[in-house]
Image: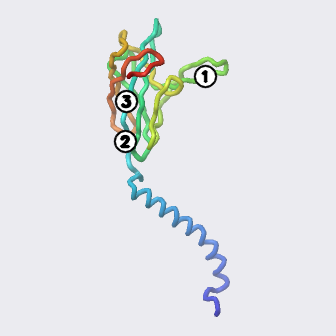
Amino acid sequence: MKNPLPTRLRAPLAAVASPVLASGVALAGLGAWTTNGNAGSPPRLAVVEGHVFLRLGATPETAAFFTITNTGGSTDRLVSVTSPRTAVRPELSRHRMSDSRAAYREPAASAAIPPGDGLTMTPHGMDVTVRPDDDWREGERIPFTLRFERADPVTVLATVVRPGENPA
């Protein structure tokens, strides 16, 4: 039986077959992802914990920490934090170590909150630097409003704890 395709068309068709097949597989995967409700779904954020360290001695600043979950389908960013109980606006910051092993604070413009995960602030990473408006007491609950790039702001109470402790 004679081959129905002319010889001059066989090579170009073979060269095109692989990319077309790969594109089809990619489209099928994207279709499945969309069907499951993940494509383009907005971030769904919740602040599940907040605590702030009790200021020690004459140190004017302390740090607040929040655990933020994102059950949505896209990343969001924490862009600012405010509180009516601070002397100056709280500031997002990261703790770093210098070459001489000295710790220092580095201001951060924002913090990513990945989908299906979230952000857990710690004394060794991301936190919020705050300057209390007066002497906060252990166990006191301080209001903070967290603002995000895409999601609505969330107001949460952070419990004042001794450094190194978490609220019960």
Quarter of the image with the N terminus is bottom right
Q: How is the image coloured?
A: rainbow
Asked if the residues shown at circle 2 and circle 1 are in contact, with their CB atoms under 8 angstroms apart, the answer is: no
Element marked by disc 2:
loop
Viewer-side residue, 110 vs 21: 21
Q: Secondary structure at mark 1?
A: strand
| Residue projecting furthest to the bottom | 1
Q: Position of residue 58 (x, y in %)?
A: 46, 6
Amino acid, disc 2: Arg
Q: For numbered disc 3, what is the local secondary structure?
A: strand
Q: Look at mark 3 in the image and give the residue it sits on.
A: 146
- Spatial CA distance of label 3 from label 2 is 14 Å
Q: Earlier in the sequence, mark 3 or mark 1?
A: 1
Most foreground residue, 87 or 29: 29
Around disc 3, counting alpha carbons within 10 Å, would you say few (fewer than 14), some (14 to 19), or many (20 or more)? some
Q: CA distance from mark 2 to mark 1?
A: 33 Å
The residue that label 1 is drawn on is 97
Q: Is 147 placed above or below 131 here?
A: below
Q: Which-is-in-front pick, marks 3 and 2?
A: 2
Residue name at image x 58 percent, y 67 percent: 19
Residue named by callout 2? 44
**Quadrant of the rendered structure where residue 61 is?**
top left
Q: Earlier in the sequence, mark 3 or mark 2?
A: 2
Residue drawn where x is 35% and y is 24% of the image: 144
Residue 59 spot, x, y in % from top left: 47, 9
Q: Amino acid at mark 1?
A: Met
Q: Residue at x 44, y 24 (%)?
A: 128
Which residue is at the front of the view, 47 or 148? Answer: 47
**CA–CA distance in space, label 3 to label 1:** 27 Å
Whether pointer 3 and pointer 1 mark residues with C-beta atoms closer than 8 Å, the reply is no
